[in-house]
Amino acid sequence: MKSLKVIGIIVGILLIFIALDLGFGYVGVFKTKTVGKAQQNAQREVFEETQSFVEGKRQEALKFYKEYISADIEDKAALTEMVSHSFANFDEDKLKEPLKTFVYNCKYQNKIE
């Protein structure tokens, strides 16, 4: 009778550990889907406002702009597509002229002079 009681206690403790693991595991998944996602989005927004990110995009725009000026018609079309993809989620208002206009025109397929 005593050994049956001990086995019952061991099985009960094991079931409690399994239930806690499942419970907290699902809580962790739920937290990752809600709070974790919001934290990652906030970190991304902060990163996109940093000086190093904006400066990197400015340098990239300047490189594309200089290539565009000396390119032939076919290369200009390809460069326009590259700029529109590279700057799709970037606010061109953070750039100074003429890069601002260049990126805007590439993104929205306006005629570039």
Image (tube, grey):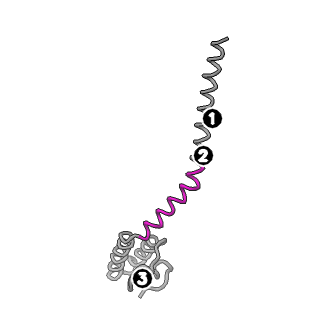
For marks 2 and 1 on the same chain, the one whose residue lies earlier in the sequence: 1
- Front of the two marks 2 and 3: 2
Expressed as whole percent of the image width and height from the top left, the position of residue 64 reads 36, 76
Classify residue 6 by image quadrant. top right
Span of residues in magenta: 29-49
Residue at 38 percent of width and 83 percent of height:
96
Classify residue 83 by image quadrant. bottom left
| Distance from the alpha carbon under mark 3 to that under mark 1 | 57 Å
- Residue type at the position of mark 3: Lys
Give the residue at mark 3: 100
For marks 2 and 3 on the same chain, the one whose residue lies earlier in the sequence: 2
Give the residue at mark 2: 27
Q: Secondary structure at mark 1?
A: helix
- Residue type at the position of mark 2: Val
**Mark seen at residue 91:** none
Give the residue at mark 1: 19
For marks 3 and 1 on the same chain, the one whose residue lies earlier in the sequence: 1
